[in-house]
Amino acid sequence: MASSKEYLDFILEQLSELDDVSYRAMMGEYIIYYRGKVVGGIYDDRFLVKPTKFAVAMMPNAEMELPYDGTKKMLLVDDVDNKEFLRKLLEAMYEELPATKKK
């Protein structure tokens, strides 16, 4: 099942307090970038992030879910209505994320 543009727009609005948030459409889903690094994505209208040390610490009870078959599990962000939490989450994750590979 593909994610809706409406859910993407909602998540982008929730992340609007952060500078340099972008996305890329990929096979009906959306990859989310923060300051050029992949933080997670929108999969089946779920916001999933990479399980970095800080993300796990901030969401100790979060479910680990597959974005799609054949991939690594990611953390399901339940508190998508809390802009301040999302801002802190992405800021905390940033330093732990690998740089995006240049093509």
Image (tube, rainbow, N blue to C red):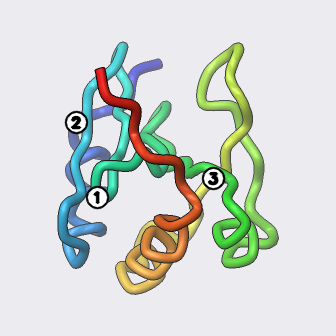
Disc on the earlier residue, 2 or 3: 2
Residue at 52%, 76% in the rendered image: 92
Residues under numbered marks 1 and 3 in contact, where contact means CB atoms less than 8 Å apart: no
The residue beneath circle 1 is: 35
Q: Nearer the viewer, mark 2 or mark 3?
A: 3
On the image, which quarter does residue 96 sit in? bottom right
Query: In the structure shown, which secondary structural element does the residue marked by tag 1 occupy?
Result: loop
Residue at 38%, 77% in the rendered image: 87
Residue at 43%, 40% in the rendered image: 42
Q: Residue furthest right?
A: 61
Q: Is residue 3 above or below residue 76?
A: above
Query: In the structure shown, which secondary structural element does the residue marked by tag 3 occupy?
Result: strand
Using the numbered discs, state the Cα–Cα distance from disc 2 to disc 3 in whole angstroms.
19 Å
Query: Residue 5: which disc?
Result: 2
Q: Amino acid at mark 1?
A: Arg
The residue beneath circle 3 is: 76
- Percent coordinates x, y for residue 53 in the rendering: 73, 66
Q: Is residue 16 above or below residue 98?
A: below
